[in-house]
Image: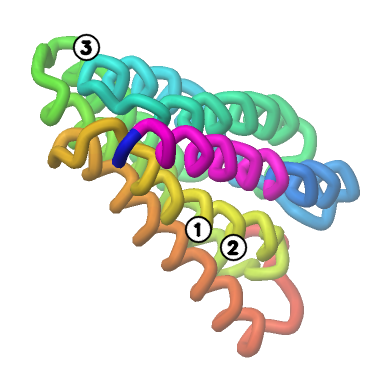
Amino acid sequence: MPDNLAVPVAVVAGLLNVLGFVPYLRDTLRRKTKPERAMWWIYAVLFGLLFAAQMEAGAGWLLFVTGAYIASSVVIAILSLWYGYGSFHKRDTISLVVAAVGLLLWQLSDRPLVAIVLVIIVDFAGFWLTLVKTWHAPHSETLISWQLAFVTAVLSIFSVGAWTLDVLIYPVYAVLATALIVWMIMYRRTKVTEDLPDF
């Protein structure tokens, strides 16, 4: 996309990410939303590495969106220590090991596409924890924040500097992932009236 269009799209996407972060932060502090601890810590590290990989791949103004992801993830990761969901489980250990291996392989890779595919694997290692939690406790997530995250992900596709596989692959994954969790929250809230405390 030309810079004269990519710039405003990237700025709007970044601002929507911040806008979605506000109700998530508010609900977390009110103990209504309960962040999945391991996921947010994985994300806090992951988005920093994604930023570096995207920069190397020539992602252009998409970096503005990833920068917004970094800021919000770090804050939620820290808050999750006090306001997070449940205790540490075997699934958290598995996800952290997969994430650590993926990050190690990322460091050893000198190809942006391989690095970003590894980032997606690491991302999903954390994201599936929130999917599992949301299935059992759909009211423990802030729906509007995930809806805005979905819109941000869609817009991020149109803020890339070059339409190449190594640049587009993560934004497309983000669209699919956020669409899935939005659907899951909405669907499960029709089936579950009270969240499970832990499982």
Seen from this angle, which residue lies furthest bottom?
190
Instruction: Indicate the position of residue 18 as horizontal and vertical percent values.
Output: 68, 39
Q: Nearer the viewer, residue 199 or 56?
A: 56
Q: What's the CA distance linking mark 2 and mark 1?
A: 5 Å
User: Quick one: label 2, few (<14), some, or many (20+) residues within 10 Å?
Assistant: some
Question: Magenta region's main secondary structure?
Answer: helix
Query: Mark 1 highlights which residue?
Result: 150
Q: Residue at x 64, y 88 (%)?
A: 190
Is 14 covered by the magenta stretch?
Answer: yes
Q: Nearer the viewer, residue 61 or 144?
A: 61
The disc, 2 or 3, on the residue closer to the chain's N-terminal end is 3
Q: Is residue 138 left or right of residue 175?
A: right
Secondary structure beneath dot 2 equals helix
Amino acid on which the number 2 mark rests in the picture:
Gln
The residue wearing badge 3 is 107
Q: Is residue 70 above or below residue 88?
A: above
Instruction: Please give the residue where the numbered disc 2 appears in the rendered image.
Output: 147
At label 3, which amino acid type do we have? Gln
**Quarter of the view holding residue 60:** top left
Image location of residue 50, percent across then percent down: 35, 25
Q: Which residues are magenta?
A: 3-20
Q: Are marks 2 and 1 in contact (CB under 8 Å)?
A: yes
